[in-house]
Image (cartoon, rainbow, N blue to C red):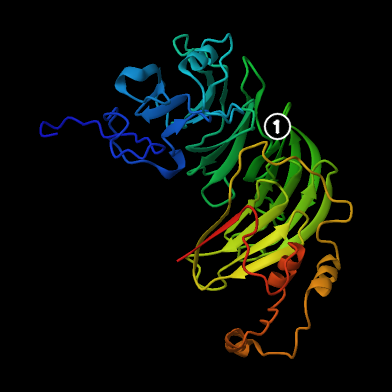
Amino acid sequence: TADGKPTNNLLFWRLSTGDSESLSAPIASFRSLMQEWAWPTVAWTDDEAILAVLLGSTIEFYRGGDPTLESREHKLRIKGVQSFSLAPTGTNSTEFTEAQRQAKLSAASSPYRIATFVPASGPRPCQVSIWEYGKFNEREELNVWAGTIAQQVKWRWTTDGSKLLASTTSVNDATSSNYTERHAAILLHASKNGFACNVPVEHNCQDIQFVNNGQFAMIDASLPMRTRLFDARNCEPVFDFGESSVNRIIASPHGRFLALGGFLGLHGRIAFWDMNKRKLMGEANHHTAQTWQWAPDSRTFLTAVHHPRKADNCIKIWSYNGHPIAELAFDELYQASMRPALPGVYPDRGQDRRGPFAKGHFAAKAKASAPNAGKYVPPQRRKAAEAQQRRQGGARPTGSGFADRLRAELGQGPSAGPRTLAGAEKSKN
């Protein structure tokens, strides 16, 4: 404003109605630049019952469906707080009445948990705390742990919100052997006086992820890198994946399968594990991949190369055990992702007895459904030959292999039209 006072500049819009008017008047003022590692500073619970906004050293809480100044319910003031996270509740529905919402909030034990992070300052270590929603006046956390000398954090919850991994980063730790950064992790249970500890790291925590609600995996950045599985109840190691050059852990949505990948400068090897049997199912390789993701049904895995990389832009789809299914090439690709689905839409399925993409499976189907491919056409002449055959009404060439095998698997002949793979979306400019 003209007098130098900050103005409220945070507005909310209701997208479901398509109204051009905002949902409420501005309710807060952001007076400083956001740091990428601390984002988001505005978040809803998964059922959208509560909205939380971080403003300075205060976290303000509003009714999720009615974020107005009058709907503010609580404030949590913590000196030096830089980041927070709302725990998932396992509730997918956002359709409930205000009476149902109040019943959840007034229960003896609220289902809502909030984690807060205060970075290290001088010799004082960082502090991670878990709070029960609405019980802030007592200033008594459910669980608290003072970790390492760290200035940044990334949050990782179990799907039921019962456990939290706080992955911390120290950007100026002189004791670190990995340049100037040191990565560690803290495990906390979201219960009164619950278990809490520093995850044992020998060198540097390269990546850490929950596999399911009872286990998590961590890559220790030794040379070569070592990956281990831990019991989330007591932080004890229960399985060793061995030493290999991997730097990413990608757990399937159902927690049954696990991919360990060596991306972003490594060789691109992807190892697929069955976590129920703790056995390696198969391997794949995509050494230039920049994006990797499981489908929501846990049956396929996506890797992609895209902008800003100029060469070899493509999407590759793999089976859950590493067999190639399809490859789609692009002149320019800017994004690739799997279409999301709510938990519970797809059942948890184990490995198929014969394997969905066993050796010879594609070939047998393609042989039964594909016509004679005809004479060989050099790659540089295939587009012209295909255009000529379309003008003449003839069958088009069968292509380079992946697309035809995918059509055969989907029950289509080589001449069938294009079909989007379930769960996969691509973006092209």
* Location of residue 399 by image quarter: bottom right
Q: Nearer the viewer, residue 11 or 39?
A: 11
- In the rendered structure, the answer to whether residue 230 lies left or right of residue 337 reads right
Relative to the observer, which residue lies in front, 331 or 344? 344
Residue in the picture at 49% in, 70% down: 332
**Rendered-image quadrant of the N terminus:** top left
Report the residue that reaches farthest toward the right.
353
Residue 24 in percent (x, y) is at 30, 29
Residue 61 position (above or below residue 250)? above
- Location of the C terminus by quadrant is bottom left
On screen, residue 147 above or below 287: above
In the displayed orientation, state which residue is furthest to the left. 2
Query: Residue at the spot x=78%, y=75% of the render?
Result: 370
Residue 152 spot, x, y in % from top left: 48, 38
Q: Position of residue 421 (x, y in %)?
A: 65, 59
Image position of 410 with respect to 89: above or below = below
User: Can residue 244 be seen here?
Assistant: no
Q: In this view, does 60 lie above or below 216?
A: above
Indicate the amino acid at tag 1.
Answer: Asn
- Residue beneath disc 1: 213
Q: What element carries label 1?
A: loop
